[in-house]
Image (cartoon, rainbow, N blue to C red):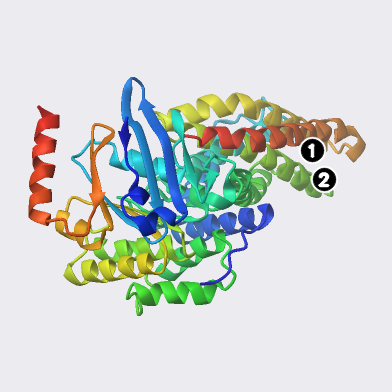
C-alpha cells in the first residue's frame, strides 16, 4: 500500500475544482443554461428598450450586471447538488482534508464557470447596445472578475446551506440575492462611469468597494462553511 | 445502555489495540434516539457483522463511526483518538461503502477511484488505482463512465473507491446489494483479505449466512441498542437467524 500524505489546502481545492470542471465540461448543463439565459435576457432587454427615451449607456450597465447575477445563480445550485445525487459528498467529508478546502474548490470551479458566462455576456451587451468602452474594456474585465469572486463566494456558501432543504431552488436566490446587491451596484456604477470615458481613478472607489466585499465575505464564507456541512 | 465489547470476547483480541471504540454513544433525531447508548470496540483484524431490522439504527451507527454524524452524546474513538470534525487524519483512515455509490456518474471508473486516492494523499495514485481496479475485477472498464455501468458494477467501483487508500476501518452498509453471484463472491474474498491484512470491518447485512461467513463477531441491533453480541466462531447460522427473527418480532410488538 502506498504511503498516505494528505494534500494541502490549495492542492485539495484544485483537485475538487478540476473534478467539478471536468463534470461540467462533459455535461455542459449549468454553463449552457446560464449562457442561454444570459443571451435571452440581453435580447429581451434590448427588445423592450426605447432608445429615444433611455440612452444605451444608462441602460447597458444595469442590464449586464442584473443578468450576471441571475445567470450566476442558475449554476450555483448545482454546485452541491451534484454531490448529493449519489452522496458523493460523504466521500469528500471522509477524506483527510480541511473542510475549507472543499469550499475553496467549489468556489474556484464556480468562478471559472461564472467568468466564462460573463466573458460571453459582456461582448453581447457591447454589441446589442453598440457601446464603446475603448481601453476601459480591460478595466471592465477586471471589475467582472472582482464581481464574480464576490458572487461565487456568497453563492457557494448559500448553495451549501440550502441544498438539503426542500425548497432549495427557491431558498438559494432568496438568501443570496440580497447579498449580491453590494456586488452588482458597484459593478454597475463603475461600468457606467467607464462608458462615459471616465479614468481609472474615477472608478477606483467602486473597485475598492468590490475588493472590500470580496475580502470580507471571502474570509467569512471560508470560516462559516464547515458549520454548514456538519450533520 | 447496551454493551458491545468485541475485544473482550476472546483473549488474543483483548490484547489488541482497538481500531474503533465508542463510549456511551447516543444520537438523537429530534425526540427519537436512533442510537441509544452503544459501547463498541473493534480491534484490528476483527469483523463485526451487525444485523437488525430496518430502522434499528444500524446505518446511523455506521455514519457515527465514520464521523459523518456528530454524536448527541458519547464519543467515537478511532485509533485511540476522538473522532471530531477536527480529526482530519483519523477520518482518512475510514473507508465507507454505503447504500449509495458515492460516485460521480459522468466520470470514468478510473477517474472516480483516482480522485479518492488523491484526496486521501496516496503517494502513488496510478499504482494504487490500478491495484484497486484489479482487485475488484474492473479491468477493461477503467475508461467507462460510471453511469454506463450496471448497479452491480457500480457497486464494485464504489468498493474500489472506498479501499484504494488502505483504510484501517472499513464500514460496509449492505455491500452485497446489487451484486451478482460472482460479484458477491469477489466481495467476500476481498473483505476476508482485508480482514486478514489487519483491517477492521463493520458490516451491516440482512443475510445471516454471508455475515457470519465473514465475521469474527456478530451483533443484533434493535431500537438503537445492541441486544446480542458474541464471537461468530461456532455460531449456528440457522439458530442465530431464528434468534434474530424472534428478537425482531419481540421488538416490533
The reply to whether label 1 and label 2 mark residues of one chain is: yes
Front in this rendered view, residue B108 or B180: B180
x, y percentage for residue A152? 62, 40
Q: Secondary structure at mark 1?
A: helix
Q: Is residue A38 left or right of residue B206?
A: right
Which labelled disc corresponds to residue A70? none
Q: Earlier in the sequence, mark 1 or mark 2?
A: 2
Q: Chain of mark 1?
A: A
Q: Is residue B24 left or right of residue B118?
A: left
> Residue at (18%, 40%) from the top-left corner?
B53
Q: Which residue is mark 1?
A: A195
Disc number lying in front (1 or 2): 2
Task: Tell me if label 1 and label 2 are in contact, CB under 8 Å.
Answer: yes
Residue B150: tell me if it is visible: no
Front in this rendered view, residue B37 or B92: B37
Which labelled disc corresponds to residue A136? 2
Q: Is residue A168 left or right of residue A97?
A: left
> Residue at (28%, 58%) from the top-left corner?
B216
The 10 Å Cα crowd at callout 2, few under 14, some 14 to 19, many 20 or more, is: some
x, y percentage for residue B189? 28, 71
Where, by quadrant of the figure, is residue A169 drawn?
top left
B233 lies above or below A73: below
Amino acid at each position: 500500500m502506498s504511503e498516505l500524505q494528505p494534500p494541502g489546502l490549495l492542492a485539495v481545492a484544485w483537485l475538487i475544482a478540476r473534478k467539478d470542471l471536468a463534470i461540467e465540461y462533459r455535461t455542459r448543463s449549468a454553463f449552457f443554461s446560464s449562457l442561454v439565459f444570459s443571451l435571452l435576457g440581453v435580447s429581451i432587454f434590448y427588445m423592450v428598450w426605447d432608445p429615444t427615451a433611455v440612452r444605451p449607456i444608462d441602460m447597458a450597465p444595469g442590464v449586464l450586471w442584473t443578468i450576471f447575477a441571475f445567470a450566476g445563480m442558475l449554476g450555483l445550485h448545482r454546485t452541491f447538488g451534484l454531490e448529493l445525487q449519489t452522496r458523493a459528498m460523504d466521500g469528500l467529508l471522509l477524506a483527510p482534508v480541511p473542510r475549507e478546502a472543499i469550499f475553496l474548490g467549489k468556489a474556484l470551479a464556480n468562478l471559472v464557470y461564472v467568468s466564462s458566462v460573463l466573458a460571453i455576456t459582456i461582448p453581447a451587451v457591447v454589441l446589442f447596445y453598440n457601446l464603446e468602452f475603448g481601453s476601459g474594456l480591460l478595466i471592465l474585465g477586471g471589475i467582472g472578475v472582482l464581481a464574480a469572486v464576490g458572487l461565487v463566494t456568497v453563492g457557494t456558501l448559500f448553495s451549501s446551506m440550502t441544498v438539503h432543504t426542500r425548497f432549495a431552488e427557491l431558498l438559494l436566490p432568496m438568501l443570496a440575492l440580497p447579498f449580491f446587491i453590494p456586488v452588482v451596484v458597484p459593478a454597475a456604477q463603475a461600468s457606467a462611469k467607464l462608458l462615459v470615458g471616465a479614468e481609472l481613478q474615477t472608478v477606483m472607489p467602486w473597485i475598492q468597494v468590490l475588493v472590500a466585499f470580496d475580502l470580507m465575505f471571502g474570509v467569512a464564507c471560508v470560516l462559516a462553511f464547515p458549520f454548514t456541512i456538519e450533520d | 445502555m447496551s454493551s458491545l465489547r468485541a475485544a473482550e470476547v476472546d483473549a488474543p483480541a483483548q490484547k489488541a489495540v482497538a481500531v474503533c471504540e465508542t463510549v456511551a454513544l447516543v444520537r438523537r433525531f429530534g425526540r427519537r434516539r436512533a442510537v441509544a447508548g452503544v459501547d463498541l470496540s473493534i480491534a484490528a483484524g476483527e469483523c463485526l457483522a451487525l444485523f437488525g431490522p430496518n430502522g434499528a439504527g444500524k446505518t446511523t451507527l455506521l455514519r457515527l463511526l465514520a464521523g459523518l454524524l456528530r454524536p448527541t452524546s458519547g464519543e467515537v474513538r478511532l485509533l485511540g483518538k476522538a473522532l471530531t470534525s477536527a480529526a482530519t487524519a483519523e477520518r482518512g483512515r475510514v473507508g465507507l461503502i454505503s447504500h449509495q455509490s458515492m460516485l460521480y456518474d459522468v466520470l470514468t471508473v478510473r477517474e472516480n477511484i483516482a480522485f479518492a486516492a488523491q484526496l486521501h494523499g496516496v503517494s502513488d495514485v496510478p499504482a494504487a488505482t490500478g491495484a484497486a481496479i484489479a482487485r475488484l475485477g474492473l479491468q477493461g472498464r477503467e475508461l467507462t463512465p460510471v453511469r454506463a455501468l450496471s448497479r452491480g458494477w457500480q457497486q464494485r467501483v464504489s468498493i474500489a473507491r472506498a479501499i484504494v487508500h488502505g483504510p484501517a476501518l472499513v464500514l460496509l452498509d449492505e455491500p452485497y446489494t446489487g451484486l451478482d453471484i460472482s460479484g458477491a463472491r469477489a466481495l467476500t474474498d476481498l473483505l476476508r483479505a482485508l480482514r486478514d491484512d489487519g483491517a477492521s470491518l463493520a458490516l451491516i447485512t440482512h443475510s445471516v449466512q454471508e455475515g457470519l461467513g465473514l465475521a469474527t463477531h456478530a451483533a443484533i441491533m434493535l431500537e438503537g441498542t445492541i441486544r446480542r453480541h458474541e464471537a461468530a466462531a461456532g455460531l449456528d447460522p440457522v439458530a442465530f437467524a431464528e434468534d434474530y427473527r424472534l428478537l425482531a418480532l419481540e421488538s416490533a410488538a
